[in-house]
Amino acid sequence: MSALILALDTTSREEALRIASLTADHLDAIKIGYPLVLGAGLSIAGEIAALGVPVIADFKVADIPNTNTLICDQVFAAGCSAVICHAFPGGDSLEACVASAHAHGGECFVVCEMSHPGGAEWFSGGVAERFSGMAVTAGADGIIAPATRPARVAALREIIGTKKIYSPGVGAQGAAPEDVKALVDGVIVGRAIYGAADPSAAAREYRDRCR
Ligand code: C5P
């Protein structure tokens, strides 16, 4: 059983709020990122949160510690409950994100392996394992790992123990909830829900398949 997280990668405020309203009852969280925030402004985070669904900011934060702190502080001030960061800038940069998240009562997730085909080029061979270890050391709340490669999710689970795993790649990228739901805490679905003719029905179906 896993939570269901909608990746709301639409670019217009109106469309985002329409889909969020239609689907919120079936979701555990909504993930927003550059497509929506660049199109609609960061205030969209608070508007979505006001619907009663937690908002995860997928900014894949990857800078020096001070800049990471400034970015994460803005994310949480805007009403987000969690932020997603990269590990490759180093442990101090990651710790800055974790500190900001926890100072605001929020959570920090670390991208450990990307879900697209190119993700296998860089993250395999020990890098994702190293990032997962960094997530543990920095006190992060969980990691992002690919539903498209369940064996990799299982390998990273060995490293992070009971920390959360949120897993994208379900739907448009080809994976199914059933591939990973026993391994992860949350399944992330984007286009297969927000691009469906009936987003509410699609969200309900994915929620049922995650249970
Ligand atoms: O539309 P789709 O279901 O493919 O959306 C997946 C979402 O998860 C997108 O927002 C994408 O940026 C994000 N993501 C991913 N793989 C990662 C990390 C994030 O697909 N490793």
Image (cartoon, rainbow, N blue to C red):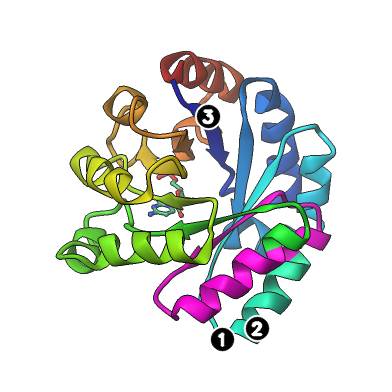
Q: How many numbered tags mark residues here?
A: 3
Task: State the CA–CA distance, disc 1 to disc 2.
Answer: 6 Å
Secondary structure of the residue carrying tag 2 is: helix
In the image: residue 108, left or right of residue 208: right
Q: Nearer the viewer, residue 180 or 159?
A: 159
Q: Amino acid at mark 1?
A: Ile
Q: Nearer the viewer, residue 197 or 56?
A: 56
For the residue carrying disc 1, how many other residues have a C-alpha within 10 Å: few (<14), some (14-19), or many (20+)?
some
Position of the N terminus, as image quadrant, is top left
Name the residue carrying label 2: 67
Q: Position of residue 79 (x, y in %)?
A: 80, 52
Q: Position of residue 134 (x, y in %)?
A: 40, 67
- Residue 92 shown in magenta: yes
For the residue carrying disc 3, how many other residues have a C-alpha within 10 Å: few (<14), some (14-19), or many (20+)?
many
Q: Is residue 151 above or below residue 211?
A: below
The residue drawn where x is 20% and y is 59% is 120
Kindly report which numbered mark, 3 or 2, lies closer to the viewer in this rendering. Answer: 2
Q: Which residues are magenta?
A: 75-100
Q: Position of residue 186 (x, y in %)?
A: 48, 34
Q: Nearer the viewer, residue 92 or 178?
A: 92
Question: Could one spot residue 42 in this view of the protein?
Answer: no
Task: State the CA–CA distance, disc 3 to disc 2.
Answer: 31 Å
- Residue 19 shown in magenta: no
Q: Which label is found at residue 64?
A: 1
For the residue carrying disc 2, how many other residues have a C-alpha within 10 Å: few (<14), some (14-19), or many (20+)?
some
Name the residue carrying label 3: 4
In the image: residue 60, left or right of residue 178: right
The residue drawn where x is 77% and y is 42% is 48
